[in-house]
Image (tube, grey):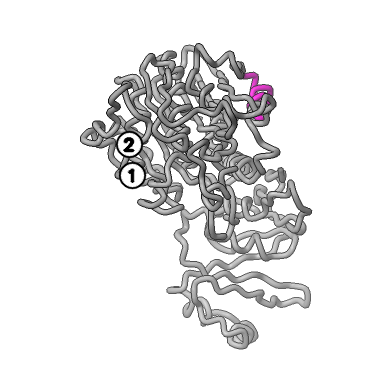
Amino acid sequence: MIDFTPLLQPDRGQPARLIDVVHPNDFAGWLSNQPPRVRALLAAQRITGKAGDKAILPGDAADDWSALLVCNEAATSPWRIASQAEILPEGTYRLRAGPVGAAGLGWLLSQHRFERYRGSDAGGPRVLLSAEPARIAETVQLARATAVVRDLVNTGASDLGPAELEAEAVALAARFGATLSVVRGDALVTGYPMIHTVGQAASRERAPRLIELEWGDPAHPRVAIIGKGVCFDSGGLDIKPSSGMRLMKKDMGGAAHALALAELVMASGLAVRLHMLIPAVENAIASNAFRPGDVLRTRAGMTVENTNTDAEGRLILGDALTRAGEAKPGLILDFATLTGAARVALGPDLPALFANDTTLAADLIAAGGVVHDPLWQLPLWDGYDEMLKSDIADMVNAPDGGFAGAITAALFLHRFVPMATPWAHIDTFAWRATAKPGRPKGGEALGLRAAWAVLRARFGG
């Protein structure tokens, strides 16, 4: 991964090219103050002040130039100048007016490339100078966390299975002196039966496991972060069509978010007792794959009639939520690429938020607005709880009919959360289908920065 640190530096008056960022409404006034040669050049290029217009402007000396960006993004947007970092040549830059602010994040992420399977096309580094040195370290941390999610989600399933997710957690624990424990394979049968059942058809090398990391002072408030780690989802015996399977390397996007958020917590030294849990499996097809109609035991003691082997993510999360609740946390956050229904309702850019605590939900939504990482709350509607009824077990995992699929999935998870424990479930896509400045097509962190902002506000750092 690229080292972001050199790309955002304190402004100590170093030589640098200037970037003018002009709102479309202000363009006419800005243009009237430019020398004739600049006005003539912009007219020749048909730069009229539309959002997205860009140009290189000549200076007084032969080798002197600056950059123009016409931008209607809010000054608080991380993506305000991201396009400039993608197209400007190697060098050092500063904004002519105003602070860098949140835009430093987009500047950094515009220079990140996923290069595991091909050579780099990033060019030389573009350095941005900031007059807010106190913000630089956190911006770099956020860029790194976002890149972690992108890189993990973009990695092909042949190179990222349950063992590789475990290796990521091992490396993270070593960096921060955290404690790591892993239950693998048949050892899951008695303690985490749903995780075992979902992952049992995978090869021995890709055996299911529950990965747990703990860090921080036990006297501090306990926070559990859980991520769905389905490293590839064939759909099981309820097999997906090829079009539905195409992106299923990203079904561990929840685990990627959990790893990235745990890194932010530890790197910032939040006053929490962190408990990260990743149930990691491959939902494969073999003679021992679990079947529609099977009744599954759970760590919580309830039974689940499996009505759809492609509704496996909620099963493994159920055991992980039970384990988290046993440690009596003050807060549980889970991330999961859980339902297509959430994408039908909200599209790819808006993660669905479910919460059993109104204050927690309000904090997450407000934080998402501030940091431009929006969430949209859907209801934990008790009236649909009856859809989970089973004739032979305590519940089904997926109701017939397909109505309210994101809600019923969240209601299923809710049954494994201790009643008095604040809990939020973020049903994220973890993918960007269309590239935007600073946000390439592929794996994406959606909901990460909103969750981080809430944890930072509550627990310091």
Q: Which mark is residue 76?
A: none
Relative to 66, residue 204 above or below: above
Task: Tell me the magenta residue range.
Answer: 168-178
- Distance, label 1 to label 2, CA atoms, is 7 Å
**Eyeballing the image, is 123 above or below 363?**
below
Q: Which of 274 and 6 is in front in this view?
A: 274
For the residue pair 206 and 307, the one nearer the viewer reads as 307
Q: Which residue is drawn at 58% across and 22% down?
A: 209
Q: Name the residue under label 1.
A: 402
The residue wearing badge 2 is 399
Quick one: SS at disc 1? loop
Asked if the residue at tag 2 contacts the one at tag 1, i.e. Cβ–Cβ closer than 8 Å, the answer is: yes
- What residue is drawn where x is 34% and y is 26%? 422
Magenta stretch: dominant SS? helix
Q: Which amino acid does label 2 sit on?
A: Pro
Residue at 58% over, 34% down: 284
Farthest residue toward the left?
383
Residue 55 placement (x, y as % from top left): 63, 75
* Residue projecting furthest to the front: 287
* Type of the residue with mark 1: Gly
Q: Does the magenta stretch include residue 195?
A: no
Q: Is the residue marked by circle 2 packed among few (<14), some (14-19), or many (20+) residues within 10 Å?
A: many
State left or right for residue 315 relative to residue 440. Answer: left
Q: Is mark 2 on a helix, strand or loop?
A: loop
Tell me: 336 left or right of 16.
left
Residue 350 seen in render? yes
Tell me where residue 91 appears, x and y as whole percent: 74, 60
- Up-down: is 298 above or below 366? above
Q: Position of residue 164 (x, y in %)?
A: 67, 31
Horizontal and vertical percent position of residue 385: 26, 32
Category of crowding for the residue at label 1, using alpha-carbon neighbours closer than 10 angstroms: few (below 14), some (14–19), many (at least 20): few
